[in-house]
Image: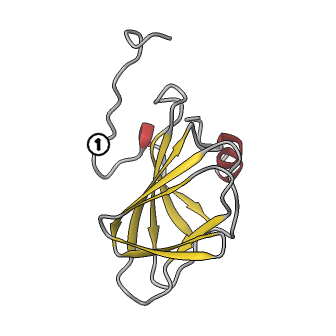
Amino acid sequence: MTTEQMKAVHTPANTNALNAPTLNVLGMPTAVKLTHGQTYGQFSCVEVDLAPRQMGPPPHVHYELDEIMRVLEGTVTVLEGDKAVEVAAGGWHFRPRGVVHTFGMDTMRLPNLLICIRAPRILPIIWKNWHNSLKIW
């Protein structure tokens, strides 16, 4: 596909990609803002809402994608291997493929809001299994 054939995509504020519902991923409200299909396989983007003292997924590793996190509100603790990094609102965190990681909020501060960008894409099979009716991948 050439760039002339590609179309711009817009997800309005307070909506999800293709008007899909917000998913409950391991207890975290997760809103898909751009799908890998909408970006022609380049990346996907999700918004995650963490409550105070909420941990993200168990430590895991991605072998086929890199992940970029932008914290919009609050402070998120990112565990990369055996090292913990605090990422405050406005901060960015890059996790290349092959790095064991997780994230969460270990205080009673205000809830956190963060964006995760996954390139080249999100893991569509896993996400479909979590929400079989979501036909946007």
Q: Position of residue 7 (x, y in %)?
A: 37, 19
Question: Which x, y percent locates residue 79?
Answer: 58, 72
Q: Residue at x 41, y 46 (%)?
A: 16
Q: Does residue 74 sit above or below 66 in this rendering?
A: below
Q: Which residue in the rendered view is the most extreme toward the front?
A: 83
Indicate the amino acid at tag 1: Pro
Q: How many marks?
A: 1
Secondary structure of the residue carrying numbered label 1 = loop
Q: Classify 19 as above or below 47.
A: above
**Residue 136 occupies which quadrant of the picture?**
top right
Residue sitting at x 50%, y 41%: 44
Which residue does the numbered mark 1 point to in the structure image? 12
Residue extending furthest toward the bottom: 108
Badge 1 density bin: few <14, some 14–19, many ≥20, Cα 10 Å: few
Question: For residue 41, what is the image quadrant?
Answer: top right
Q: Quadrant of the C terminus?
A: top right
| Relative horizontal placement of residue 8, taking residue 127 as reference (left or right) | left
Q: Is residue 111 left or right of residue 136?
A: left
The percent position of residue 113, horizontal first and vertical second, equals 38, 66
* Residue 109 placement (x, y as % from top left): 37, 86
Residue drawn at the location 55% of the way across and 77% of the way down = 84
Residue positioned 70% across, 57% down in the render = 61
